[in-house]
Image (spheres, rainbow, N blue to C red):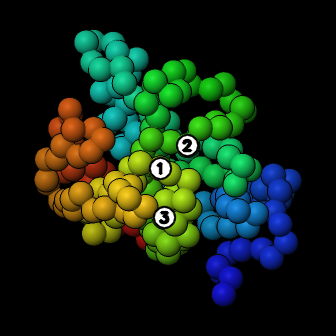
Amino acid sequence: MDHPFTTRKPATYADLAALPPNVKGEILDGVLYTQPRPMLDHSDLQSEIHGELWAHYDRGRRGRPNRWLIIQEPGIQLPRSPEFSPDVAGWLRSRLPERPIRPEPIGIVPDWICEVLSPSNRKYDTHTKRRFYLEIGVPYLWYVDPVERTLLVTRLYEGRWLELGSYSDGDVVRAEPFEEIEIDLSIWWECMPLLGD
């Protein structure tokens, strides 16, 4: 059965370029998946997560560790996908030392991906993309659900996703692969009304 937002013909980058501005598209294994662009609340939470991690891994300034490059909505290009863009992704600097200059896509599988769930993307993110991320070997996958105010942390282990922890509301967590920092989840929700997109 086709995904409700898919096309049947093998998709190309030209198909992505032809999408209207209010539609986000990704190509996985030759299939174009489209969905409405996220609402402002979704984008705000994405930015909060990015900012939280970037503040700790900002090129080693202020004595902080310089192990990760964290990018919001990166354009990633792999043999199986001419374009996909997680909400937030991270690479160990040992694998991707410098931020690529746009519009050059990144050709390296991320070491960590975080997807922010909303009604319009939940099934796509938790089924289609989850399987794709497993198959391309993403080591860590987080899901943030702003309606439930939860964080689910998973790690790739022996060909499947292993749940490492589920956190909510005001939990303060040290979650893989960022165990060296504390994340206060209550800060993520402060500017968040319930999502309605």
176 vs 17, left or right, is left
> Residue 49 falls in which quadrant of the image?
top left
Pointer 2 residue: 109
Q: Position of residue 12 (x, y in %)?
A: 83, 56
Up-down relation of residue 89 to residue 66 (above or below): below
Could you tell me the amino acid type at mark 2?
Answer: Val
Could you tell me the amino acid type at mark 3?
Answer: Arg
Q: What is the CA distance from the residue labelled 3 to the residue labelled 2?
A: 14 Å
Q: Earlier in the sequence, mark 3 or mark 2?
A: 2
> Within 10 angstroms of label 1, few (less than 14), some, or many (20 or more) residues?
some
Q: Residue at x 31, y 61 (%)?
A: 162
Q: What is the CA distance from the residue labelled 1 to the residue labelled 2?
A: 6 Å
Pointer 3 residue: 130
Pointer 1 residue: 138
Q: Position of residue 156 (x, y in %)?
A: 38, 55
> Residue 77 falls in which quadrant of the image?
top right
Q: Earlier in the sequence, mark 1 or mark 2?
A: 2
Query: Are dots 1 and 2 in contact, CB under 8 Å?
Result: yes
Q: Residue at x 40, y 64 (%)?
A: 160
54 vs 190, left or right, is right
